[in-house]
Amino acid sequence: MGMIRSMTGFGRSETQDAHSYFICEIKTLNHKFLEMGFRLPNSISIFDDKVKELIKSRINRGKVYLTITEEIPHELGRDVFIDEKLAKGYHNKLKKLKGKLSLSGEIKVSDLISFPGVINQKLTQKNIQRLWPSLRKVVSKSMDKLVREREREGECLSRDIMRRIKKITKAVSVIKRKSNLSVQKYKKKLASRIKELSGNQPMDKGRIEMEVAIYAKNSDISEEITRLNNHIDNFNRTINKASGEVGKKLDFIAQELHREINTVGAKSSDYGISMGVIEAKTEIEKIREQLKNIE
């Protein structure tokens, strides 16, 4: 069996070196496409694109939630940044407040820098670049754990889907056998009914044969049976050779199975065939539900 992956999973890892301590958590959920949401500290937001490329190299579909927390030692070189616009705003507000309340005294620099956001520290560009190896390592380790979990769940889903495909194959086999018998059953039933209504009058065998031929033509499902078996073979080949993104293709094949089995149900009035159709449709619907979680 090929490698099938679920779209749900979780991975967490930590890494520490002389420059940093990172914790990375990645969670993925079902989604039609690949969609990423990040929560990176401002100090490493410069690496957004690189982190996205790491994720794209391992994940094809799903909604990705990534959170990174950091601890960076103060010894690592930083630039001091003063937000002059913000400081000026605080100064103007303090002047108005001072006049309004008739307060004395000067507004000092120490007053202004005590407000949040006036003084900020930023890592120098040189030292920001030093963080990338550790960041790449922690994201990769989290991805490894996430992918392993997605593969484990995908394996469970594959086994369940293959069990259901076997049930569908069996149901189609029953439908084929019943369809071969249904014309003969109809002929006997029709002859019996005509005999019952006509009493001892001789039966028009030509008319009976014509009615049987019309019934056989209208209820013929041989083409649908052939297509159903072809779709089942295609589904088995796809899942056995699976690697990477196969969920969409498998869902398309399942849709075709559903369409053909509906046609069989619409054409036939035979009880045995109807039971086979219900069995197959039930399993196809369950498979399509499972495929929503396949990458």
Image (cartoon, grey):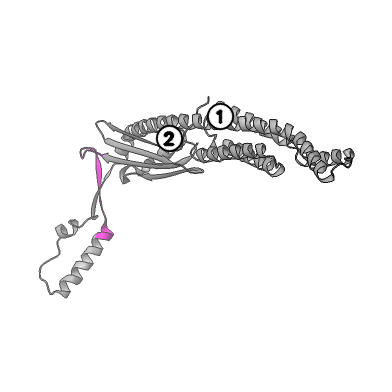
Q: Is residue 147 in sight in this rendering?
A: yes
Q: Which of 244 and 224 is in front in this view?
A: 224
Q: Is residue 241 in sight in this rendering?
A: no
Residue shown at the point (53%, 39%) measured from the top left? 286
Residue shown at the point (43%, 38%) measured from the top left? 8
- Between disc 2 and disc 1, whose residue precedes? 2
Q: Name the residue under label 2.
A: 54
* Residue 119 in the image, given as x and y percentages of width and height: 22, 52
* Residue 233 in the image, given as x and y percentages of width and height: 63, 28
Q: Does residue 241 show up magenta in the picture?
A: no
Residue shown at the point (53%, 26%) measured from the top left? 2
Residue shown at the point (77%, 42%) measured from the top left? 218
Q: How crowded is mark 1: few (under 14 residues within 10 Å), some or many (20 or more)?
A: many
Give the amino acid at mark 1.
Ile
Closer to viewer: mark 2 or mark 1: 1
* Lateral position of residue 143 relative to residue 86, left or right: right
Question: What is the distance, in whole Å, between disc 2 and disc 1 at their CAs?
Answer: 26 Å
Give the farthest residue toward the front. 200
Range shown magenta? 71-86
* Lateral position of residue 32 relative to residue 145, left or right: right
Q: Name the residue under label 1.
A: 239
The number of callouts visible is 2
* Residue 207 in the image, given as x and y percentages of width and height: 87, 41
Give the amino acid at mark 2.
Leu
Q: Does residue 72 show up magenta in the picture?
A: yes
Question: Of helix, strand and loop, which one carries label 1?
Answer: helix
